[in-house]
Image (tube, rainbow, N blue to C red):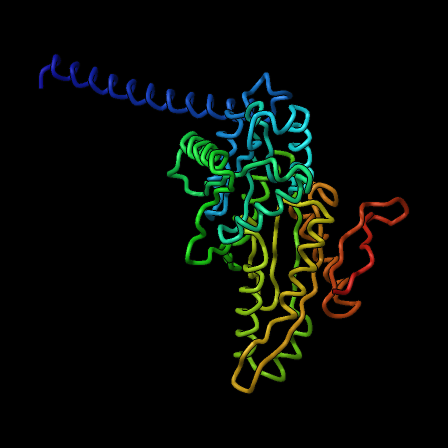
Amino acid sequence: MSGLSQLLIACAQVFLVAVAAFAVTCLLMSLLKYDLRVRAARYAPDSSSAPPEELLRVEIADRQKRPGPGIVLFLLSPGSADSVAPAGVDHARARLAASLRTSDLVLQLDDLTLAALLICRPQAVDVVAGRLREALGRAESGAWRLAAVLAGQPVQRPADLIAEARKRLALARQQSRDILPEPPSKEVRPPLFGPDNFLPELQRYVAYYRKSGASVSLLSIAVDNLDRYGRHYGAHALENVGAAVSSALQQNIRIGDFVAHVRQGSFLACLPARMGEAESVGRRLVRAVRALSIPFERGTLRVTISIGVATIPEHAPRLKAALDCSRRALSQAQSRGPGRVMVFSAPQAGRGAEGIAPQKARQV
Protein backbone atom coordinates (compact mmCIF):
# COMPACT_ATOMS: atom_id res chain seq x y z
CA MET A 1 0.00 0.00 0.00
CA SER A 2 1.42 3.36 -1.03
CA GLY A 3 2.04 6.20 1.37
CA LEU A 4 -0.71 8.25 -0.30
CA SER A 5 -3.29 5.51 0.35
CA GLN A 6 -2.28 5.25 3.99
CA LEU A 7 -2.58 9.02 4.33
CA LEU A 8 -6.07 9.01 2.81
CA ILE A 9 -7.19 6.20 5.15
CA ALA A 10 -5.81 8.06 8.16
CA CYS A 11 -7.59 11.26 7.09
CA ALA A 12 -10.86 9.34 6.66
CA GLN A 13 -10.52 7.85 10.14
CA VAL A 14 -9.84 11.26 11.66
CA PHE A 15 -12.85 12.68 9.81
CA LEU A 16 -15.16 9.89 11.07
CA VAL A 17 -13.96 10.39 14.64
CA ALA A 18 -14.54 14.14 14.34
CA VAL A 19 -18.07 13.61 12.97
CA ALA A 20 -18.91 11.16 15.77
CA ALA A 21 -17.55 13.54 18.41
CA PHE A 22 -19.54 16.42 16.94
CA ALA A 23 -22.75 14.34 16.94
CA VAL A 24 -22.24 13.31 20.57
CA THR A 25 -21.52 16.91 21.56
CA CYS A 26 -24.70 18.12 19.84
CA LEU A 27 -26.74 15.43 21.60
CA LEU A 28 -25.31 16.35 25.00
CA MET A 29 -25.94 20.05 24.36
CA SER A 30 -29.54 19.30 23.37
CA LEU A 31 -30.11 17.27 26.54
CA LEU A 32 -28.52 20.01 28.65
CA LYS A 33 -30.68 22.71 27.04
CA TYR A 34 -33.80 20.63 27.65
CA ASP A 35 -32.87 20.04 31.29
CA LEU A 36 -32.25 23.76 31.82
CA ARG A 37 -35.56 24.53 30.13
CA VAL A 38 -37.37 22.08 32.43
CA ARG A 39 -35.77 23.56 35.53
CA ALA A 40 -36.47 27.12 34.43
CA ALA A 41 -40.11 26.33 33.79
CA ARG A 42 -40.66 24.31 36.96
CA TYR A 43 -38.95 26.64 39.39
CA ALA A 44 -39.89 29.94 37.78
CA PRO A 45 -40.85 32.41 40.54
CA ASP A 46 -43.74 33.89 38.55
CA SER A 47 -45.70 33.47 35.38
CA SER A 48 -43.68 36.11 33.53
CA SER A 49 -40.59 33.85 33.67
CA ALA A 50 -42.32 30.79 32.25
CA PRO A 51 -45.63 30.82 30.36
CA PRO A 52 -48.16 28.58 32.15
CA GLU A 53 -48.79 26.45 29.07
CA GLU A 54 -45.06 25.85 28.70
CA LEU A 55 -44.87 24.75 32.33
CA LEU A 56 -47.85 22.45 31.76
CA ARG A 57 -46.20 20.85 28.70
CA VAL A 58 -43.01 20.28 30.68
CA GLU A 59 -44.90 18.71 33.59
CA ILE A 60 -46.89 16.38 31.32
CA ALA A 61 -43.72 15.20 29.57
CA ASP A 62 -41.98 14.69 32.90
CA ARG A 63 -44.84 12.74 34.46
CA GLN A 64 -45.26 10.53 31.39
CA LYS A 65 -41.91 8.98 32.32
CA ARG A 66 -43.52 7.38 35.37
CA PRO A 67 -45.08 3.91 34.89
CA GLY A 68 -48.82 3.61 34.48
CA PRO A 69 -51.40 5.49 32.39
CA GLY A 70 -53.05 7.30 35.28
CA ILE A 71 -52.23 10.91 34.37
CA VAL A 72 -55.32 13.05 33.77
CA LEU A 73 -55.45 16.65 32.55
CA PHE A 74 -58.54 18.63 33.57
CA LEU A 75 -59.37 22.03 32.08
CA LEU A 76 -61.98 24.25 33.71
CA SER A 77 -63.54 27.47 32.48
CA PRO A 78 -66.66 29.54 33.23
CA GLY A 79 -69.62 28.69 31.03
CA SER A 80 -69.67 32.29 29.79
CA ALA A 81 -67.11 35.07 29.95
CA ASP A 82 -69.21 37.23 32.27
CA SER A 83 -70.39 34.49 34.66
CA VAL A 84 -67.23 34.64 36.82
CA ALA A 85 -65.19 37.73 37.66
CA PRO A 86 -61.37 37.68 37.26
CA ALA A 87 -61.00 37.56 41.03
CA GLY A 88 -63.33 34.55 41.03
CA VAL A 89 -61.01 32.67 38.68
CA ASP A 90 -58.05 33.28 40.98
CA HIS A 91 -60.14 32.25 43.97
CA ALA A 92 -61.16 29.04 42.19
CA ARG A 93 -57.53 28.25 41.40
CA ALA A 94 -56.58 28.64 45.06
CA ARG A 95 -59.45 26.39 46.20
CA LEU A 96 -58.53 23.68 43.71
CA ALA A 97 -54.88 23.78 44.74
CA ALA A 98 -55.82 23.50 48.41
CA SER A 99 -58.03 20.46 47.75
CA LEU A 100 -55.44 18.41 45.82
CA ARG A 101 -52.28 16.62 46.87
CA THR A 102 -48.88 18.31 46.84
CA SER A 103 -47.84 16.21 43.82
CA ASP A 104 -50.74 17.58 41.74
CA LEU A 105 -50.45 20.74 39.68
CA VAL A 106 -52.96 23.57 39.30
CA LEU A 107 -52.27 26.41 36.84
CA GLN A 108 -54.15 29.34 35.37
CA LEU A 109 -53.51 29.05 31.63
CA ASP A 110 -55.25 32.28 30.65
CA ASP A 111 -57.83 34.74 31.98
CA LEU A 112 -60.65 32.17 32.02
CA THR A 113 -58.99 28.73 31.94
CA LEU A 114 -57.64 26.65 34.81
CA ALA A 115 -55.67 23.42 34.39
CA ALA A 116 -55.32 20.61 36.93
CA LEU A 117 -52.80 17.84 36.23
CA LEU A 118 -53.09 14.88 38.57
CA ILE A 119 -52.76 11.13 38.89
CA CYS A 120 -55.84 8.99 39.32
CA ARG A 121 -57.33 5.76 38.05
CA PRO A 122 -58.93 6.20 34.61
CA GLN A 123 -62.06 4.54 36.02
CA ALA A 124 -62.30 7.28 38.67
CA VAL A 125 -62.16 10.35 36.43
CA ASP A 126 -65.83 11.13 37.04
CA VAL A 127 -65.32 10.82 40.81
CA VAL A 128 -62.35 13.20 40.68
CA ALA A 129 -64.37 15.62 38.55
CA GLY A 130 -67.03 15.62 41.26
CA ARG A 131 -64.41 16.38 43.89
CA LEU A 132 -63.09 19.28 41.83
CA ARG A 133 -66.61 20.69 41.68
CA GLU A 134 -66.95 20.27 45.44
CA ALA A 135 -63.71 22.22 45.87
CA LEU A 136 -65.15 25.07 43.79
CA GLY A 137 -68.08 25.33 46.20
CA ARG A 138 -71.80 24.83 45.66
CA ALA A 139 -72.50 28.44 44.80
CA GLU A 140 -69.73 28.74 42.19
CA SER A 141 -69.64 25.20 40.80
CA GLY A 142 -72.60 25.64 38.47
CA ALA A 143 -70.90 28.47 36.60
CA TRP A 144 -67.96 26.28 35.54
CA ARG A 145 -67.54 23.79 32.71
CA LEU A 146 -65.02 20.98 32.84
CA ALA A 147 -63.23 18.75 30.32
CA ALA A 148 -60.59 16.08 30.78
CA VAL A 149 -58.19 13.95 28.73
CA LEU A 150 -56.05 10.96 29.69
CA ALA A 151 -52.40 11.95 29.38
CA GLY A 152 -50.50 8.85 30.48
CA GLN A 153 -49.05 7.57 27.20
CA PRO A 154 -45.54 8.84 26.28
CA VAL A 155 -46.42 8.62 22.56
CA GLN A 156 -48.87 11.49 23.05
CA ARG A 157 -47.22 14.88 22.64
CA PRO A 158 -48.03 17.26 25.52
CA ALA A 159 -48.92 20.07 23.10
CA ASP A 160 -51.41 17.80 21.31
CA LEU A 161 -52.96 16.75 24.63
CA ILE A 162 -53.44 20.36 25.69
CA ALA A 163 -54.93 21.22 22.30
CA GLU A 164 -57.34 18.27 22.56
CA ALA A 165 -58.32 19.32 26.09
CA ARG A 166 -59.01 22.87 24.88
CA LYS A 167 -61.25 21.52 22.10
CA ARG A 168 -63.19 19.46 24.60
CA LEU A 169 -63.50 22.43 26.93
CA ALA A 170 -64.86 24.60 24.12
CA LEU A 171 -67.42 21.89 23.34
CA ALA A 172 -68.31 21.60 27.04
CA ARG A 173 -68.98 25.35 27.21
CA GLN A 174 -71.03 25.19 24.03
CA GLN A 175 -73.15 22.25 25.23
CA SER A 176 -73.26 23.35 28.90
CA ARG A 177 -72.04 20.02 30.23
CA ASP A 178 -68.84 18.33 31.40
CA ILE A 179 -66.96 16.23 28.85
CA LEU A 180 -64.94 13.39 30.37
CA PRO A 181 -63.05 10.51 28.72
CA GLU A 182 -64.64 7.09 28.55
CA PRO A 183 -63.09 4.84 31.23
CA PRO A 184 -61.15 1.82 29.90
CA SER A 185 -62.93 -1.52 30.09
CA LYS A 186 -59.99 -3.17 31.87
CA GLU A 187 -59.04 -2.00 35.34
CA VAL A 188 -55.58 -0.43 35.52
CA ARG A 189 -53.54 -0.99 38.67
CA PRO A 190 -50.16 0.27 39.81
CA PRO A 191 -47.37 -2.27 39.22
CA LEU A 192 -46.46 -4.57 42.12
CA PHE A 193 -42.69 -4.77 42.59
CA GLY A 194 -41.08 -7.83 44.15
CA PRO A 195 -38.19 -8.35 46.59
CA ASP A 196 -35.64 -8.55 43.77
CA ASN A 197 -36.39 -5.27 42.03
CA PHE A 198 -38.26 -2.98 44.43
CA LEU A 199 -35.30 -1.07 45.91
CA PRO A 200 -33.86 0.46 42.68
CA GLU A 201 -37.39 1.34 41.56
CA LEU A 202 -38.14 2.89 44.95
CA GLN A 203 -34.97 4.99 44.78
CA ARG A 204 -35.95 6.29 41.34
CA TYR A 205 -39.51 6.94 42.50
CA VAL A 206 -38.44 8.97 45.54
CA ALA A 207 -35.82 10.91 43.55
CA TYR A 208 -38.45 11.79 40.91
CA TYR A 209 -40.73 13.50 43.44
CA ARG A 210 -38.05 14.91 45.71
CA LYS A 211 -36.43 16.88 42.88
CA SER A 212 -39.51 19.12 42.85
CA GLY A 213 -39.51 19.47 46.65
CA ALA A 214 -42.61 17.34 47.29
CA SER A 215 -42.93 15.39 50.53
CA VAL A 216 -42.81 11.62 50.04
CA SER A 217 -44.30 9.20 52.58
CA LEU A 218 -43.29 5.59 53.17
CA LEU A 219 -45.74 3.05 54.56
CA SER A 220 -44.20 -0.12 55.98
CA ILE A 221 -46.97 -2.73 56.05
CA ALA A 222 -47.08 -6.15 57.72
CA VAL A 223 -49.74 -8.83 58.09
CA ASP A 224 -50.51 -9.26 61.79
CA ASN A 225 -49.90 -12.65 63.45
CA LEU A 226 -48.49 -14.16 60.27
CA ASP A 227 -46.58 -16.93 62.09
CA ARG A 228 -49.79 -18.11 63.74
CA TYR A 229 -51.53 -18.35 60.36
CA GLY A 230 -48.59 -20.34 59.03
CA ARG A 231 -48.67 -22.83 61.90
CA HIS A 232 -52.42 -23.36 61.72
CA TYR A 233 -53.11 -23.25 57.98
CA GLY A 234 -49.82 -24.04 56.23
CA ALA A 235 -47.71 -22.46 53.50
CA HIS A 236 -50.42 -22.55 50.83
CA ALA A 237 -52.71 -20.40 52.96
CA LEU A 238 -49.88 -17.89 53.43
CA GLU A 239 -49.51 -17.68 49.65
CA ASN A 240 -53.23 -16.92 49.36
CA VAL A 241 -52.91 -14.25 52.06
CA GLY A 242 -49.97 -12.62 50.27
CA ALA A 243 -51.78 -12.55 46.92
CA ALA A 244 -55.01 -11.18 48.44
CA VAL A 245 -53.27 -8.45 50.43
CA SER A 246 -51.16 -7.46 47.40
CA SER A 247 -54.31 -7.11 45.30
CA ALA A 248 -56.08 -5.08 47.99
CA LEU A 249 -53.15 -2.68 48.27
CA GLN A 250 -53.01 -2.21 44.49
CA GLN A 251 -56.75 -1.54 44.34
CA ASN A 252 -56.73 1.05 47.13
CA ILE A 253 -53.86 3.33 46.19
CA ARG A 254 -53.59 5.65 43.23
CA ILE A 255 -52.25 4.45 39.91
CA GLY A 256 -49.09 6.55 40.28
CA ASP A 257 -48.23 5.35 43.79
CA PHE A 258 -45.57 2.75 44.54
CA VAL A 259 -46.28 -0.65 46.10
CA ALA A 260 -43.99 -3.63 46.65
CA HIS A 261 -44.23 -7.12 48.16
CA VAL A 262 -40.95 -7.03 50.07
CA ARG A 263 -41.10 -10.52 51.58
CA GLN A 264 -43.71 -12.93 52.90
CA GLY A 265 -46.26 -10.92 54.86
CA SER A 266 -44.39 -7.62 54.43
CA PHE A 267 -45.20 -4.83 51.99
CA LEU A 268 -44.12 -1.28 51.27
CA ALA A 269 -46.08 1.61 49.80
CA CYS A 270 -44.68 4.99 48.81
CA LEU A 271 -46.65 8.04 47.71
CA PRO A 272 -46.15 11.78 47.26
CA ALA A 273 -48.06 12.96 50.33
CA ARG A 274 -47.65 14.71 53.66
CA MET A 275 -47.90 12.89 57.00
CA GLY A 276 -51.61 13.47 57.51
CA GLU A 277 -52.49 12.39 53.98
CA ALA A 278 -50.33 9.27 54.28
CA GLU A 279 -51.96 8.36 57.60
CA SER A 280 -55.40 8.61 55.96
CA VAL A 281 -54.22 6.33 53.15
CA GLY A 282 -52.90 3.90 55.76
CA ARG A 283 -56.25 3.76 57.52
CA ARG A 284 -57.99 3.13 54.19
CA LEU A 285 -55.61 0.24 53.45
CA VAL A 286 -56.22 -1.29 56.89
CA ARG A 287 -59.99 -1.19 56.31
CA ALA A 288 -59.63 -2.69 52.82
CA VAL A 289 -57.58 -5.65 54.06
CA ARG A 290 -59.86 -6.21 57.06
CA ALA A 291 -62.81 -6.53 54.66
CA LEU A 292 -61.13 -9.35 52.70
CA SER A 293 -62.46 -12.89 52.81
CA ILE A 294 -59.52 -15.02 51.64
CA PRO A 295 -60.41 -18.51 50.37
CA PHE A 296 -58.37 -21.64 51.06
CA GLU A 297 -59.13 -25.37 51.07
CA ARG A 298 -60.72 -25.41 54.53
CA GLY A 299 -62.81 -22.28 54.27
CA THR A 300 -61.93 -18.59 54.37
CA LEU A 301 -59.43 -16.46 56.27
CA ARG A 302 -59.64 -12.92 57.58
CA VAL A 303 -56.47 -10.99 58.32
CA THR A 304 -55.43 -7.54 59.48
CA ILE A 305 -52.40 -5.39 58.72
CA SER A 306 -50.46 -2.83 60.74
CA ILE A 307 -48.74 0.15 59.16
CA GLY A 308 -45.86 2.44 60.12
CA VAL A 309 -45.60 5.81 58.36
CA ALA A 310 -42.57 8.06 57.86
CA THR A 311 -42.20 11.08 55.60
CA ILE A 312 -39.27 12.58 53.68
CA PRO A 313 -38.02 15.18 54.60
CA GLU A 314 -40.05 15.71 57.80
CA HIS A 315 -38.75 12.60 59.56
CA ALA A 316 -35.53 11.97 57.65
CA PRO A 317 -33.88 13.58 54.63
CA ARG A 318 -32.71 10.29 53.10
CA LEU A 319 -34.56 7.22 51.92
CA LYS A 320 -32.65 4.71 54.08
CA ALA A 321 -33.27 6.66 57.29
CA ALA A 322 -36.94 7.17 56.39
CA LEU A 323 -37.33 3.43 55.80
CA ASP A 324 -35.86 2.78 59.24
CA CYS A 325 -38.33 5.25 60.76
CA SER A 326 -41.32 3.63 59.07
CA ARG A 327 -40.20 0.16 60.18
CA ARG A 328 -39.76 1.30 63.76
CA ALA A 329 -43.21 2.88 63.67
CA LEU A 330 -44.57 -0.42 62.34
CA SER A 331 -42.99 -2.34 65.23
CA GLN A 332 -44.53 0.09 67.71
CA ALA A 333 -47.94 -0.24 66.03
CA GLN A 334 -47.83 -4.04 66.14
CA SER A 335 -46.83 -4.01 69.81
CA ARG A 336 -50.10 -2.20 70.58
CA GLY A 337 -52.35 -4.69 68.83
CA PRO A 338 -53.48 -5.63 65.30
CA GLY A 339 -54.91 -3.28 62.70
CA ARG A 340 -53.16 -0.08 63.78
CA VAL A 341 -51.52 2.81 61.95
CA MET A 342 -48.66 4.74 63.54
CA VAL A 343 -46.88 7.87 62.30
CA PHE A 344 -43.45 8.81 63.54
CA SER A 345 -43.25 12.14 65.30
CA ALA A 346 -40.71 14.87 64.51
CA PRO A 347 -37.37 14.84 66.38
CA GLN A 348 -37.57 16.27 69.89
CA ALA A 349 -34.95 17.35 72.37
CA GLY A 350 -34.21 14.94 75.19
CA ARG A 351 -35.03 11.84 73.16
CA GLY A 352 -31.49 10.53 73.18
CA ALA A 353 -29.34 9.71 70.22
CA GLU A 354 -32.18 8.52 68.02
CA GLY A 355 -34.11 11.76 68.44
CA ILE A 356 -37.35 10.37 67.06
CA ALA A 357 -40.37 9.12 68.95
CA PRO A 358 -43.42 7.42 67.44
CA GLN A 359 -46.80 8.99 67.92
CA LYS A 360 -49.70 7.20 69.53
CA ALA A 361 -50.95 4.31 67.44
CA ARG A 362 -54.43 4.62 66.01
CA GLN A 363 -56.63 1.58 65.69
CA VAL A 364 -58.84 1.46 62.63
Can I make out residue 244 in this image?
Answer: yes
Task: Give the quadrant of the N terminus.
Answer: top left
> Where is residue 262, by image quadrant?
bottom right
- Taking the spot 38% from the left edge, 21% from the top edge, the residue there is 25
332 to the left or right of 246: right
Q: Position of residue 202 (x, y in %)?
A: 56, 48
Q: Position of residue 349 (x, y in %)?
A: 89, 44
Total numbered badges shown on the rendered structure: 0
70 to the left or right of 8: right
From the viewer's side, name the closer residue of 216 and 29. 216
From the viewer's side, name the closer residue of 224 and 127. 127
117 to the left or right of 224: left
> Where is residue 98, by image quadrant?
top right
Task: Give the quadrant of the C terminus.
Answer: bottom right
Q: Position of residue 21 (x, y in %)?
A: 33, 21
- Taking the spot 61% from the left edge, 39% from the top edge, the residue there is 142
Point out the residue furthest to the top here: 4
Q: Is residue 248 above or below residue 204?
A: below
Point out the residue furthest to the right here: 350
Can I make out residue 61 in this image?
Answer: no
- Taking the spot 50% from the left edge, 26% from the top edge, the residue there is 35
Q: Is residue 34 above or below residue 358?
A: above
Q: Position of residue 58 (x, y in %)?
A: 50, 29
Point out the residue furthest to the left here: 1
From the viewer's side, name the closer residue of 60 and 75. 75
